[in-house]
């Protein structure tokens, strides 16, 4: 029988004869026994394929271009290392992401540092490491850099602008509209650019814009290109990221090829033909390659049927952050008929700790495994210790082999910072 849920998993995900999901060649019950639950499981083959797709689609159309993975979406060293091995640069948004990127073996020249409130310490780390580009978000960034950069050196910078594009995504992940905490309006940006161009320690390389995250229509992302051109002619134009990822049956984001072509059509119209273009995919790069595996701990049939799992908002804040919808299936019983509508909730002491509402499943039992596809983005990175929760492991699977790249936290880990 067909299994609709497979549409949301990477290619090559299958169902065994007994109805058990096989992900990256590994049975999910075997994964649960070896690594426990909850666990974030990544199909390494799918992850690498997505990185190659982005790189090929961009550079085949605009050779002087580079893909820079937005590390904040999945800042595991192992994930960053995959991107580096596949020829991508890394976008980092803080000191920890810089340090993990360096551990992953990236060429510092291929790092792009973002942030609306960079600390002096983070900028010092960036300058000491020789980061390729620092994206200036405010005049304070310039003040600090001019104090930090040694005499006789220059730090290459981009200036982030507000392109005045109000995207159709959730307000919590909009970034291109007037009033955003990120970037500068064009008049203010022009003033800062003039200051940087006169600085003996900074080199004005170009401009950057980003309009938001989880955007399905690439024309909204391409709309930021023309405002960049208003700032002048530069060697580098960073067009940001933001392409939406597929989470549900009803969502159909643009393909990578459609996204890239929309951006490049605008670039051909507005930007110099010899400029270097940068794009910064994050969510759409990693989301589809991963799933989260849970165990059902409680089934409460009352006014509604609540299926509680052993994780929740401690490993997935996307629902609470901007009401992201997910799909899921009983990973060991995919051949069973769905007969009841349930609410999948987490174990945390918050009414907002709801993972999926509603979801139609077979009759659920304590001990069932629940697989939630499309959880590669912003799960690991926002995992937390609420209620003393131990953050889950990250497991890579490939051709039937599984390995943990981040271990599960221990009880002792929770107290390592106590004095």
Image (cartoon, rainbow, N blue to C red):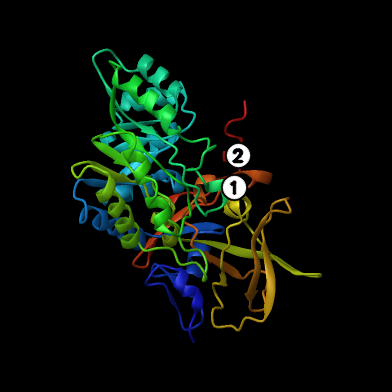
| Disc 1/disc 2 C-alpha distance (Å) | 8 Å
Which percent across, then down, holds residue 193? 35, 25
> Mark 2 = which residue?
414
Q: Residue at x 50, y 63 (%)?
A: 247
- Callout 1 crowding tier (Cα within 10 Å): few <14, some 14–19, many ≥20: many
Looking at the image, residue 210 sits to the left or right of residue 379; the answer is left
Q: Residue at x 50, y 77 (%)?
A: 4
Q: To which residue does mark 1 refer? A: 390
Residue 37: where, in percent of width, then height? 56, 59
- Measured from the top left, where is residue 309 in percent x and y? 65, 61
How many neighbours does mark 2 have within 10 angstroms: few (below 14), some (14-19), or many (20 or more)? some
At mark 1, the secondary structure is loop
- Say whether residue 234 is left or right of residue 228: left
Dot 2 falls on a residue whose secondary structure is helix
Q: Is residue 105 visible?
A: no
Picture quadrant where residue 254 is located: bottom left
- Looking at the image, is 289 positioned above or below residue 277? below
Image height of 259 relative to 100, above or below:
below
Q: CB under 8 Å between callouts 1 and 2?
A: yes
Above or below: residue 128 compared with residue 414:
above
Q: Quadrant of the C terminus?
A: top right
């Amino acid at each position: 029988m067909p299994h609709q849920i497979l549409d949301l998993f990477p290619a090559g995900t299958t169902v065994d004869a007994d109805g058990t999901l096989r992900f990256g060649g590994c049975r999910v019950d075997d994964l649960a026994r070896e690594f426990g639950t909850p666990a974030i499981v990544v199909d390494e083959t799918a992850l690498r394929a997505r990185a190659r797709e982005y790189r090929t689609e961009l550079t085949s159309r605009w050779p002087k271009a580079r893909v820079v993975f937005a590390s904040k979406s999945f800042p595991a060293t192992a994930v960053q290392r995959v991107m580096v091995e596949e020829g991508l640069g890394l976008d980092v948004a803080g000191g920890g992401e810089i340090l993990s990127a360096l551990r992953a073996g990236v060429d510092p020249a291929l790092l792009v540092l973002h942030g609306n409130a960079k600390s002096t310490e983070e900028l010092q780390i960036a300058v000491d490491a020789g980061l390729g580009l620092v994206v200036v978000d405010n005049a304070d960034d310039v003040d600090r850099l001019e104090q930090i950069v040694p005499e006789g050196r220059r730090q290459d910078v981009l200036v982030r602008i507000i392109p005045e594009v109000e995207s159709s995504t959730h307000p919590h992940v909009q970034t291109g509209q007037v009033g955003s905490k990120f970037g500068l309006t064009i008049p203010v940006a022009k003033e800062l650019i003039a200051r940087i161009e006169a600085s003996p320690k900074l080199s004005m390389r170009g401009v950057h814009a980003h309009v938001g995250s989880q955007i399905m229509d690439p024309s909204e992302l391409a709309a930021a290109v023309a405002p960049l051109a208003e700032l002048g002619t530069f060697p580098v134009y960073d067009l940001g990221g933001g392409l939406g990822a597929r989470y549900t049956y009803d969502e159909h984001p643009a393909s990578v090829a459609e996204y890239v072509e929309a951006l490049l059509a605008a670039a051909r119209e507005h930007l110099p033909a010899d400029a270097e273009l940068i794009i910064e995919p994050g969510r759409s790069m990693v989301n589809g390659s991963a799933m989260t595996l849970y165990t059902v701990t409680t089934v409460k049939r009352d006014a509604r049927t609540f299926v509680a799992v052993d994780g929740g908002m401690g490993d997935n804040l996307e629902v609470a952050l901007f009401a992201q919808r997910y799909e899921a299936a009983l990973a060991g019983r995919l051949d069973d008929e769905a007969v009841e509508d349930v609410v999948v909730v987490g174990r945390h002491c918050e009414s907002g700790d709801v993972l999926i509402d509603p979801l139609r499943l077979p009759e659920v039992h304590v001990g069932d495994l629940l697989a939630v596809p499309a959880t590669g983005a912003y799960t690991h990175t926002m995992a937390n210790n609420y209620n003393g929760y131990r953050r889950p492991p990250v497991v890579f699977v490939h051709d039937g082999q599984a390995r943990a790249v981040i271990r599960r936290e221990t009880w002792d880990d929770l107290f390592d910072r106590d004095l």
